[in-house]
Every structure is written in structure tokens, then in C-alpha cells.
Image (tube, rainbow, N blue to C red):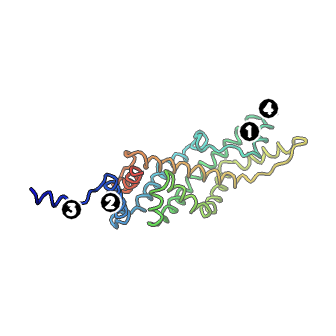
């Protein structure tokens, strides 16, 4: 008994704070090991999440009224054309104004069908190093990364697709008539909008917004992680959020 007492005297007293600190360091070490586990390709998990967004959410945009009746991404008139819209309606030409808005959204819906492969190819460029930062970032970190990394190239590829789409749905002809009608009104400041540029940018915004919705769903909803790699990769994010 005396030996036990003597031994206990030499055992350092560890406070609860020290214990918590040790546990925290242990969790951080485990997290680092997990992030660098060669068996778990984080970039593949994020690519799958983004591809799910493209397949599940962006595909909705290609349907009739995919843009027009989706308030999250519906293309509305820019400020320059809002005065055109207002002037036409004041002249009893509301039907022409409605058709002008509709065809811009139809052009976007039609263009996304052809442009989806562009977004799929862009996803392939996410590196493992970037993926680690993205995984532990905000709920739309992957989408934001994809948008910042690819928007310039995407615009260059997407713009001619939109131009073709505007012609296909007869939008250019309809808007030519609308602008001609508006510019013929006495005392108005004539307009000559670049519809191709505007619709291209608005369509891209809509696509990224829908991808972000799916990314958030996978990040917060366990049931949305429909594959083993999604479950494994986003479990790392869950551990990080639990600690913080």
C-alpha cells in the first residue's frame, strides 16, 4: 500500500483543460492524416458533387420554362431595357414586351443543352490541393472556385452558343422589332443593347446558382450523399464543423 502511495506522488496531476487540449490536438492530427490519405481522393469527391449539380440541377434549366418559371434564375430585363418594356406597355404593346422577355429565357434554356459538356469538362481541372481547401470552405466553396477558375474560358465558349440559341428561338428578330419600335418613339434616348453578352452572363449565373444549390444539399443533407466517396469525403467536413 505504501508503495502505491509513493508511486502516486510521482504521477503528474493533469487538469481538465490539459486533457481537452490533448484531445483537440489528437483530433487535428487525425484530420490531417485523413486529408492526406492516398486512399481517399478528396478531389474526386468534390468533382462528383459538382457533376451531380450539373446532372440534377442544371438539367432542369434545359426544360421548357426551366429559366422562365424559375424565380431563382429567371432572366429579367437589364436597366436599359426596363425603360423599353415600360414604354411599350404604356403604348398598349404589352404582348410584344412579354414576348421579348420570354424569348431571352428560351434562348438560355436552349443554350444550356449545348453548353452542359463545357461545365463538365471544367470540373475535371480541380486539383487535389485545391480540393482540400474547398472541402473545408463555405457551403458554396466548390461552386465559387469553379466559377472563378473557369468563367473567362466558359464565356468564350458559351457566348457563340448563346448567339446560335438567340437565332434559333427567333429572339434576335423579335428584339430587333422591339428596339425599332421603341427608338421610333419621339424624344426617347435610343438604345442598342448587346443581348448576346447580357444573356450569356445571365445564363452562366443561373447555371452556377443551380450547381451551388446541389453542393449545399450534399454538404448539409446526409441523404444527398448517394455514393461511398461522397459520404467519406464530406464526413471530413462534418468533423471540422463539429469541432468548430
Left or right: residue 222 versus residue 96 is left
- Residue 194 x, y percent position in the rendering: 74, 54
Residue 97 image label: 1
Q: CA distance from mark 1 to mark 3?
A: 88 Å
Left or right: residue 70 versus residue 25 is right
Residue 10 image label: 3
Whichever of callouts 4 and 3 sits on the residue coming sooner in the sequence is: 3
Residue pictured at 71% horizontal, 42% vertical: 100
Foreground disc of the pair 4, 3: 3
Circle 3 Cα neighbour tier, 10 Å, few/some/many (<14 / 14–19 / ≥20): few
Foreground disc of the pair 2, 1: 2
Q: Which residue is mark 2?
A: 26
Residue pictured at 85% horizontal, 45% vertical: 183
Residue pictured at 32% horizontal, 58% vertical: 22
Q: Which residue is mark 4?
A: 92
Residue pictured at 34% horizontal, 67% vertical: 38
> Dot 3: what SS?
loop
Q: Is residue 19 above or below residue 105?
A: below
Circle 2 Cα neighbour tier, 10 Å, few/some/many (<14 / 14–19 / ≥20): few
Whichever of callouts 2 and 3 sits on the residue coming sooner in the sequence is: 3
Whichever of callouts 2 and 1 sits on the residue coming sooner in the sequence is: 2
- Residue 125 x, y percent position in the rendering: 49, 66
Q: CA distance from mark 1 to mark 4?
A: 10 Å
Amino acid at each position: 500500500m505504501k508503495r502505491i502511495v509513493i508511486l502516486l506522488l510521482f504521477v503528474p496531476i493533469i487538469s481538465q483543460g490539459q486533457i481537452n487540449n490533448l484531445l483537440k490536438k489528437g483530433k487535428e492530427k487525425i484530420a490531417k492524416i485523413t486529408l492526406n490519405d492516398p486512399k481517399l481522393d478528396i478531389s474526386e469527391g468534390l468533382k462528383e458533387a459538382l457533376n451531380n449539380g450539373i446532372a440534377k440541377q442544371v438539367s432542369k434549366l434545359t426544360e421548357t420554362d426551366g429559366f422562365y418559371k424559375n424565380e431563382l434564375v429567371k432572366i429579367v430585363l437589364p436597366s436599359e431595357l426596363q425603360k423599353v418594356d415600360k414604354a411599350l406597355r404604356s403604348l398598349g404593346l404589352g404582348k410584344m414586351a412579354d414576348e421579348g422577355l420570354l424569348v431571352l429565357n428560351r434562348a438560355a434554356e436552349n443554350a444550356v443543352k449545348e453548353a452542359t459538356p463545357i461545365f463538365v469538362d471544367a470540373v475535371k481541372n480541380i486539383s487535389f490541393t485545391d480540393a482540400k481547401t474547398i472541402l473545408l470552405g463555405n457551403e458554396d466553396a466548390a461552386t465559387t472556385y469553379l466559377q472563378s477558375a473557369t468563367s473567362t474560358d466558359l464565356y468564350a465558349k458559351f457566348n457563340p452558343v448563346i448567339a446560335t440559341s438567340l437565332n434559333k428561338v427567333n429572339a434576335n428578330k423579335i428584339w430587333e422589332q422591339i428596339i425599332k419600335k421603341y427608338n421610333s418613339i419621339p424624344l426617347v434616348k435610343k438604345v442598342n443593347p448587346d443581348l448576346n453578352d447580357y444573356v450569356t452572363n445571365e445564363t452562366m449565373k443561373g447555371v452556377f446558382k443551380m450547381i451551388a444549390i446541389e453542393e449545399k444539399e450534399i454538404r448539409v443533407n446526409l441523404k444527398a450523399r448517394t455514393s461511398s466517396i461522397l459520404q467519406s469525403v464530406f464526413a471530413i467536413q462534418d468533423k471540422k464543423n463539429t469541432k468548430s
